[in-house]
Image (spheres, grey):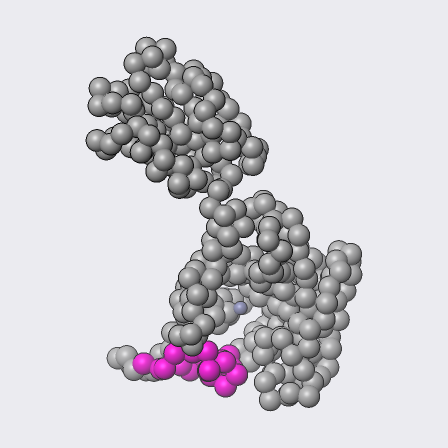
Amino acid sequence: MRRELWKISGHEGFYSGNMYTPMELDDAEYRLKPMNCPGHILIYKNSPRSYRDLPVRLAELGNVYRYERSGTMHGLLRVRGFTQDDAHIFCTPGQIEDEVVACIDFAEAVLKTFGFQEFKVELSTWDPNDRAHYAGSDENWNLAFSSLQRALERKGIAYKTIPGEAAFYGPKIDVKLVDVLGRLWQLSTVQFDFNLPARFELEYVGEDGERHQPVMVHRALFGSVERFFGVLIEHYAGAFPLWLAPIQAGLVPISERHHDYAKKVEAELKAAGLRVEVDDRNEKMNGKIRDFANQKTPYILVFGDKEESAGSVSVRTRAKGDQGSVPLADFIAKCKELVASQSTEL
Ligand SMILES: [Zn+2]
């Protein structure tokens, strides 16, 4: 995005240490975007807004680029270019608390869906002794902080206040989840912002017919999608529940003459919406089973003459091993039920 935009937003001053060197293109200087906010602000500004339009909620999976020192890069968990599930909500000051509460509910619902049960919440604010790193007046910072505080109290959520950890444009609520090994991961964030609306001179026409300035909420649920996947893989140690597993069933024909039946089984499972893979390499059956087992594939289906003539599959589950032969239709029905209920059972 044009460098001019980052000057208006304040990123040039407050955030340039995390940004890549400007590049000259045909008509102007540009910088890789470290955040999506100014883009959403331009969309908001593109048409006149009235109080009846608010809240305006804009969301995208946005690619952002932030400078990280090479020593700090770490697998999927810390990268220099990533995808944020980013949203910005433009609303009246009176709507802010409800919007923040709705964001916290949304974050909770998403994280619980993926199987995380335990969270720690932090309310990060500025350090009043370090004015140089934060934009805006004392009054606005106090107002923003108390709005977030009220939202948390309304939800009855216990939180810890962390001074000096806010974004330069406003305080934020960070939701950190606790994984199976008790490690903390920063994922969801809800931020209050009065600065960018002022810097970009955002407006809406109020009920009184006058021009007013909206406030903004920045929120991300996964945070970085790449990092979220990293955390998810760690949390399940690769053994995903059926609904999440990239390959839900591995198909193992015992010999080459069962390849036609393998195609039929594959087609039926795929038609039922399941993700499956046939191992039709010229390898020993036990080797194929071992390979699927090493990938922690939830189900391994083995079949030979007996299964083919009965229209069945011999089922092995990741947790319980060999379960014997099951009619294919029964296996499909069970999988559909487990996927629909997002069960962790097999
Ligand atoms: Zn933002």
Give yes or no for residue 163 being in the magenta stretch. no
The x, y position of residue 147, in whole percent, is: 73, 68
Judge left or right: residue 139 versus residue 59.
right
The x, y position of residue 304, in whole percent, is: 31, 18
At x 68%, y 88%, the residue is 129
Dominant secondary structure, magenta = helix
Please identify the quarter of the rendering in which residue 168 is found. Answer: bottom right
Q: Nearer the viewer, residue 103 or 235?
A: 235
Residue 119 position (above or below residue 266): below
Judge left or right: residue 255 versus residue 290.
left
> From where the camera sits, is residue 62 visible?
no
The x, y position of residue 7, in whole percent, is: 47, 83
At x 47%, y 33%, the residue is 318
Judge left or right: residue 346 versus residue 290.
right
At x 73%, y 64%, the residue is 159
At x 61%, y 83%, the residue is 134
Quarter containing the N terminus:
bottom left
Q: Nearer the viewer, residue 330 or 47?
A: 330
Where does the magenta region start and end?
1-23
Residue 57 position (above or below residue 163): above
Residue 318 position (above or below residue 66): above
The image shows a total of numbered marks equal to 0
Q: Nearer the viewer, residue 184 or 112?
A: 184
